[in-house]
Amino acid sequence: MTVTYRWVQWNRHKRRYDAVLAAIVAGYLVTFIGVGTMTHAPPREVGLPVLAMRALATLAIVLLHVILLIGPLARMTPLAAPLLYNRRHLGVTFFLIALMHGVLAVGYYGAFGVREPVSATVGGHGSFGSISGFPFELLGLLALLVFFVMAATSHDFWLSNLTPRVWKAMHMLVYVAYGLVVLHVALGALQSERSPAYAVALLLGVALVAGAHLVAGMREWRRDAAGARAADGRWVDVCSIDDLQERAGHVICLRGRERVAIFRYDGRVSAVSNVCAHQGGPLGEGRIVDGCITCPWHGYQYVPDTGQSPPPFTEKIATYELRLEGRRILLNPVPRQPGTAVDPVRIPTRQRDEASPS
């Protein structure tokens, strides 16, 4: 979270994450090429450029599957949160690896003729009506262009100026690009493989990504479907004081409405939208840090009773009215305009002492 744009917003955690990621990438490439050199000795020798292409390609597709699994896994377990927090760094790293694979392939297969290298590699070598002869290189190029747009717009500069909604919609093209990559591999490299192991591995990867998204989506749909009914003008009994932990969020699902995050802090209770204005992160899964609700995804912060980010930041989220009846907390399901101050519910000292938050 910053009011000025920097190329990379590194902190100690991100530096450690990037160092580990770089070590994994280097280790994978060195191991793949080293093992490949030993197992493909003459007369079945495979040249170093081809081994490098294969190493980059396999690493890229593994990273792509990991990236696509981070989102649904984060909905199922908080252990995936560190990966989600740094997913853009992982995405840019994946793009650079895929780009190196593409550049090496174009240079190796298309740079020694009379035609321009890219057109020589992508066009004129197959038929769209044939599975075995399909020009799969074109699919890889299209996917790479999508990944380029995503990597180039990954910075918060674009998120802010395109608006979060447009930015998110554009980055959902990752699923289109993923489909192109799967077809690129299935119609390309797998056509010359005699062992079914690679095809099985690809199918398992697709099944894992699709299955994880379906499971996570069903879990979220069931939570919303089981939520309280809310009608305009009617207060909804949403929870007890005892359900709230000090400085931790509590997510309320309302049928047909946006989720609400309720926070208890310093003898008060406030309610805001559960959706972070940055990338739609689940605020109710975060905590209050230094007096501000802190998004667990990227650390964006909001003052609990106003829904505004602390100065000089300008992000705002919707707030909700609450009232206390005995030990029950009632919510007005109609959100106030983002950034509207709402008086927090104050817990009487006697009830505060009786409650036992962890």
Image: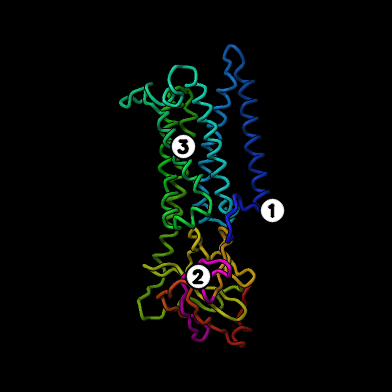
Mark 3 and mark 1: Cα distance apart in space? 31 Å
Residue that carries the numbered disc 2 in the rendered image: 261
Q: Which mark is residue 144?
A: 3
Q: What residue type is labelled 3?
A: Leu
Eyeballing the image, is 18 above or below 280?
above
Q: Does the magenta stretch include residue 323?
A: yes
| Nearer the observer, 342 or 326 | 342
Tell me which residue sits at (65%, 25%) in the image.
Answer: 34
User: In the rendered structure, which disc, 3 or 1, sits on the residue that comes first in sequence?
Assistant: 1
Mark 1 and mark 2: Cα distance apart in space? 29 Å
Instruction: For label 2, count other residues whose C-alpha is less than 10 Å away and answer few (under 14), some (14-19) or many (20+).
Output: many
Q: Residue 12 carries which label?
A: 1
Mark 2 and mark 3: Cα distance apart in space? 39 Å
- Whole-percent x, y for residue 189 in the image: 46, 26
Tell me which residue sits at (52%, 71%) in the image.
Answer: 308
Display colour scheme: rainbow
Q: Which residues are the magenta region?
A: 305-329
| Nearer the observer, 271 or 7 | 7
Q: Is residue 322 magenta?
A: yes
User: In the rendered structure, which disc, 1 or 2, sits on the residue that comes first in sequence?
Assistant: 1
Horizontal arrangement in the rendering, residue 157 relative to residue 335 (left or right): right
Eyeballing the image, is 225 above or below 88?
below
Tell me which residue sits at (44%, 33%) in the image.
Answer: 140
The image quarter containing residue 58 is top right
